[in-house]
Amino acid sequence: MPLTATSAEETDSVELGIATDKVCYIIARARQFDAKEANSDPNSGSDAVDDSFSDILEDKPDDAVQRELLKFINGLDIDEQLTLVALAWLGRGTYDKSEWNEAMSTARSEHNNRTGQYLLGLPLLGDYLEEGLSQFGMACSDESDTR
């Protein structure tokens, strides 16, 4: 599902430090990653057709979506990574919008080289990021949406 960014007018606008389209991309991919389930077919066949494509939703150690997300997140500059972490915390309820500067400061002080792994360890990452964006009047919408 391709997503694009939309934003509402806000009088107290904050510059997030990351393009909203990048956050929307991560939200879409994180939801694909979150949809994975435990190994439901330990004796899988030789190919996807033999297994009726059931393996595609299994959480495997070498998951392509996970690799793609890790590469994308770890490829962002530090300010973009900090913003993602702060947005996730905002969406999770750890901070609220009035504490944005504090969330960013904490993200900066706790930053390490494992931002991608940390974020992918949050089970509802896509939802958290979406909620964080919504607190700034921004949203991701399906390109086919005719609103």
Image (tube, rainbow, N blue to C red):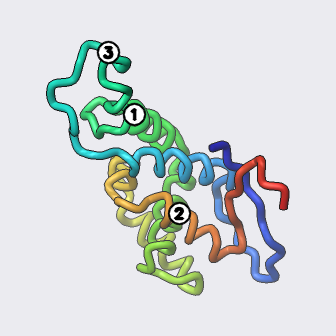
Q: In which quarter of the image is residue 130?
A: bottom right
Report the side of 13 relative to 37 (left or right): right
Q: Which amino acid does label 1 sit on?
A: Arg
- Residue 14 position, x and y percent, is 70, 72
- Residue 71 position, x and y percent, is 45, 35
Tell me which numbered mark, 1 or 3, is placed earlier along the sequence. 3
Does dot 2 land on a helix, a strand or a loop? helix
How many angstroms separate mark 2 from mark 1 (CA)?
19 Å
- Residue 52 position, x and y percent, is 36, 26
Classed neighbour count for the residue bearing mark 3: other residues with Cα under 10 Å, few (<14), some (14–19), many (≥20): few
Q: How many labels does the image show?
A: 3
Q: Report which residue position mark 2 lands on.
A: 129
Classed neighbour count for the residue bearing mark 2: other residues with Cα under 10 Å, few (<14), some (14–19), many (≥20): many
How many angstroms separate mark 1 from mark 3 (CA)?
21 Å
Q: Residue 67 carries which label?
A: 1
Residue at left offset 40%, top offset 49%? 35
Which is nearer the eye, 82 or 8?
A: 8
Q: Residue extending furthest bottom?
A: 98
Q: Residue extending furthest top?
A: 46
Location of the N terminus by quadrant is top right
Circles 2 and 3, Cβ within 8 Å, touching? The answer is no
